[in-house]
Image (cartoon, rainbow, N blue to C red):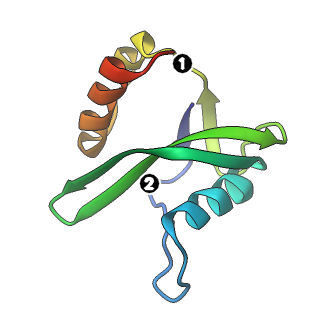
């Protein structure tokens, strides 16, 4: 699923609140999309300069997506990913999804 935030600022990990990456993505999906997710596994860990991003394979276990902090969301196939513009830090994982994703 792709989402587009209303602002360019995203604060997922709070330095004062010790949380795992898994706890953070579960909390963020609940707070920003009003859904409960389960995490199947880590798809990729990307490091680029001082940016560290972890991508998870997740599934919705409860709720229907409600956009609280995003202006748009959509489910896309791996073939449709090339129709969208992503930030440079996401390029590697987009290529991995197109190559390795079964859906």
Q: Residues within 10 Å of mark 1 (few under 14, many from 20)?
A: few
Tag 1's secondary structure?
loop
Residue behind mark 2: 8
Q: Pick the residue in front: 56 or 64.
A: 56
Instruction: Kindly give the residue lying farthest to the front in the view shown.
Output: 40
Q: Position of residue 79 (x, y in %)?
A: 40, 10
Say which residue appears at 50% left-offset and 14% top-offset: 77
Instruction: Kindly give the residue lying farthest to the top in the view shown.
Output: 79
**Mark 1 vs mark 2, CA separation in Å:** 22 Å
Residue behind mark 1: 76
Q: Is residue 29 left or right of residue 25?
A: right
Q: Is residue 45 left or right of residue 31?
A: left
Among the 4 quarters of the image, the one containing residue 47: bottom left
Q: Pick the residue in front: 31 or 71.
A: 31
Q: Nearer the viewer, mark 1 or mark 2?
A: 1
Say which residue appears at 51% left-offset and 53% top-offset: 7
Q: Is residue 11 visible?
A: no
The answer to whether residue 70 is above or below residue 79 is below
The answer to whether residue 14 is above or below residue 102 is below
Instruction: Kindly give the residue lying farthest to the bottom in the view shown.
Output: 16
Say which residue appears at 31% left-offset and 40% top-offset: 90
Tag 2's secondary structure?
loop
Q: Position of residue 54 (x, y in %)?
A: 39, 53
Dot placed on the residue nearer the N-terminal end, 1 or 2: 2
Q: Residues within 10 Å of mark 2 (few under 14, many from 20)?
A: few
């Amino acid at each position: 699923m792709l989402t587009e935030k209303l602002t360019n600022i995203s604060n997922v990990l709070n330095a004062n609140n010790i949380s795992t990456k898994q706890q953070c993505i579960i909390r963020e999906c609940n707070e920003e999309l009003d859904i409960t997710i389960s995490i199947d596994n880590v798809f990729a860990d990307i490091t680029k300069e001082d940016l560290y991003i972890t991508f998870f394979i997740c599934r919705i276990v409860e709720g229907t997506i409600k956009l609280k902090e995003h202006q748009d969301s959509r489910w896309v196939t791996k073939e449709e990913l090339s129709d969208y513009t992503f930030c440079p830090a996401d390029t590697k994982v987009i290529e991995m999804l197109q190559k390795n994703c079964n859906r």
